[in-house]
Amino acid sequence: MKSILIIIFTSIIIFCSCKSEKNIKPISAEYKKEIEDWHKKRIENLKKETGWLNLVGLFWLQDGENSFGSGENNKIIFPKNSPTEIGKFIKNDSKILFESNPNVNVFSDGKKVDKIVMKIDLSGNPTILESGSLKWFIIKRDEKYGIRLRDLNSDLVKNFSGIERFPIDENWKITAKFIPYEKPKEVEIPTIIGTIEKEISPGKLNLKIDEKEYFLEPTSAGEKLFLVFADLTSGEETYGAGRFLVVEKPDSNNNVIIDFNKSYIPPCAFTKFATCPLPTDENKLRVKITAGEKNFGEEH
């Protein structure tokens, strides 16, 4: 009886091993290079002056005068490596005026600025002010206006050691079917700061993982489609508030390639000063997506 059980157990192991080997898709040199090149560019973008690693502050403006600088008497307190009293922002409805302290040199586009009406980030060409290693500009989120502050010499930029990833697995490069809406649909996207962003979704993506059917609802992003999704790795191996993924628009047969090896963690994984969108209920997948970037440091 004991020998029969051993034979059966051994057969199960052999069967399982064969099945596992059959499901493993060898990584071609071309595909590995594609993913590694994508990841290298991703890291380079994070480290850029316009990247997410140098964010050191986000300060929401109140109506009227908002004094700022490193001094404790300011309404908005900047880091200690900034002047004590830099100046003030005067908010009048949607108009934001900056006035510099006479004793402080603040520059914009290389020119000293004493007073200027600020263009916000949504204009596509925001007014950027700078003093020393600090740069700041105005963002608008919902009806809120705030100062987004960068320090080009921030500790995170200097000490950044990369992002842990799942092993590259071409099985996670999936062909989905695009199902267009009769007309593009306005979607309300929640954000990590409690606001709602309204985006346009052209349709849904129907995909299969391990023979099970799932749906994702992307939003339009210029010539691409943008996904904010969560899965059963969220809050465990990956960032709790979900991950991002950019995909091409559907081809002539309404096929869309979703490569989860290119899924990446949002800016909020690096800094508490970002205003990231969160996954909608439609984009919370009840499956583990073991591909792409994992988590980074402590969650914010």
Image (spheres, helix red, strand yellow):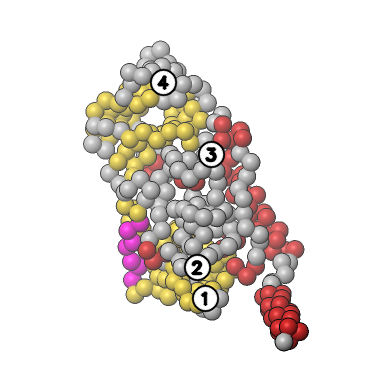
> Residue 57 has which mark?
none
Label number found at residue 53: 3
Element under disc 3: loop
Q: Secondary structure at mark 4?
A: loop
Q: Which residue is mark 1?
A: 208
> Residue 287 shows which numbered tag?
2
Q: State how far apart marks 3 and 4 are (Cα).
A: 21 Å
| Disc on res. 70 | 4
- Which quadrant is home to the C terminus? top left
User: Which residue corresponds to the image point at 47% horizontal and 33% vertical from the top-left?
Assistant: 56
Mark 3–mark 2 distance (CA, rounded to whole Å)? 30 Å
In the rendered structure, the answer to whether residue 14 lies left or right of residue 127 reads: right
Whether residue 207 appears in magenta in the rendering, the answer is no
Amino acid found under the numbered disc labelled 4: Ser
The residues tagged by marks 2 and 1 sit, at their Cα atoms, a distance apart of 11 Å
Amino acid identity at mark 2: Val
Against 193, residue 229 (above or below) is below
* Distance between mark 2 and mark 4 Cα atoms: 47 Å
